[in-house]
Image: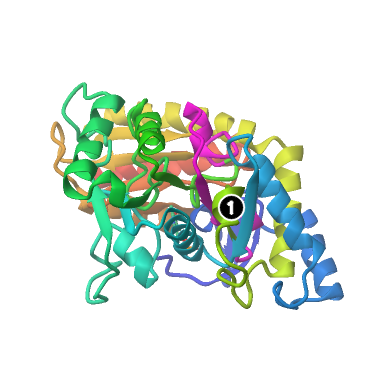
Amino acid sequence: MLPVYIDRADGAVLVDVDGNSYIDLGSGIAVTSIGHNVESVVDAVNDQMRHFAHTCFMVGPYEGYVAVCEKLNELTPGGHAKTSILLNSGAEAVENAIKVARHATGRQAVVVFDHAYHGRTNLTMALTAKNMPYKDGFGPFAPEVYRAPMSYPFRDPEGMSGEESAGRAIEVIEKQVGAANVACVLIEPIQGEGGFVVPAAGFLPAVASWCRDSEVLFVADEVQTGFCRTGDWFACENEGVVPDLVTTAKGIAGGLPLAGVTGRSELMGNVHTGGLGGTYSGNPVACAAALAVIRTMWDLDLGGEARRIGAVIEARLHGLQKQHPVIGDVRGRGAMQAIEFVKPGTTVADPATASAVAAACHAAGVVILTCGTWSNVIRLLPPLTIDDALLNEGLDVLAESVAAAVA
Ligand SMILES: *Cc1c(COP(=O)(O)O)cnc(C)c1O
């Protein structure tokens, strides 16, 4: 996306090989949430490298893996007994959550939503909604995946409540799949790549409660929303939703590849020994980084910082929306905020303006990302350690870029 190569990074600033600096409002897609080049993480990684870099946890176990799982069990929503497994990527975590759900329920169907993004492996391509660029020409896709309508307040009928939009989704599940065939409903509590779609209040609790009544597992994909991004450790906490299984990755290890599945112990324990795993899963260096990241998130109250950042961004974006009718919607939670570009006064997507704004930001030294089913959304995912001055400097550039794009 950026027409430059990066040489180094510190805090919320990237520096390219020619010495140009960029304000990072993307965090490598919500990964470096504690900032770049954080000393406690660098030290933890170096220290682990000096001990050992790999044994394969299934061959020679080590404490770091167990400690990360204990943290996941403690921090994810719900006070029930939990068990975690570690993997390498978000897609791999999602695949493993579905293996667990199918094994525990003896059912096969998986329900996902419009605009969903769950990864690029074969099973997760089937779960992901958008064809180009994720699926085009890469079929055939895995069977027993069904898609239900998402709550998308900006595009739903005016005044549609969360409960009503949940009813619309449940109707599709009951009529087209049959509750008794469904192993799990898999959902991002706030959609990431699909456009930072925040469902109407009441939608997630209503879907979760239908799942409970139907003995269908509720799986929250918190790969992008997790680890303080939305102002809580996990986005499900906002409405008190307790998932049966939670997938995590991205922000968990400050840039090292690590992912997790955390679930009710009776579900996770239902799988036979050796049924889940992988050569590099829960690599000790990545685990050392994750433990340092989680400690830093606690010490610096990065959930609180995400709320501070969210308040600054929201105020600025609402101000921009007042000036520019091309901004149809401002939405998000905490340090996960977006603007959706449309033809003024309509919901017709305007991807050309979104890409012009993104290109202008990049040229002016600010890294921002686009997303959305129509590629017409600009999303902001700054490091949770960015200060107000640098954040506002980045948002000034965004404002100038929007003004230039619509001029
Ligand atoms: C990024 C993402 C994934 C896939 O994670 P990878 O590490 O890229 O495999 C899955 N789910 C969500 C919600 C994501 O944002």
Please say whether residue 335 is visible from this viewpoint. no
Residue 282 among those drawn in magenta: no
Residue 245 among those drawn in magenta: yes
Front residue (pair 227, 20) = 227
Residue visible at 42% across and 69% down in the picture = 3
Front residue (pair 246, 9) = 246
Front residue (pair 49, 162) = 162
Residue numbers of the magenta segment: 229-257
Vertical side of 379 occupied by 45: above or below: below
Please say whether residue 393 is visible from this viewpoint. yes
172 sits left or right of 268 in the view: left
Q: Quadrant of ligand 1?
A: bottom left
Residue 15, image x, y percentages: 59, 63
Quarter containing the N terminus: bottom left
371 sits left or right of 381 in the view: left
Q: Please tell me whether mark 1 sits on a helix, a strand or a loop.
A: helix
Count of numbered circles in the view: 1
Residue 166, image x, y percentages: 28, 33
| Residue 327 image-quadrant placement | top left
**Residue to which mark 1 is pinned:** 251
Residue visible at 73% across and 62% down in the picture = 65
Q: Amino acid at mark 1?
A: Gly
Q: Residue furthest top?
A: 159
247 sits left or right of 158 in the view: right
Residue visible at 19% across and 47% down in the picture = 350
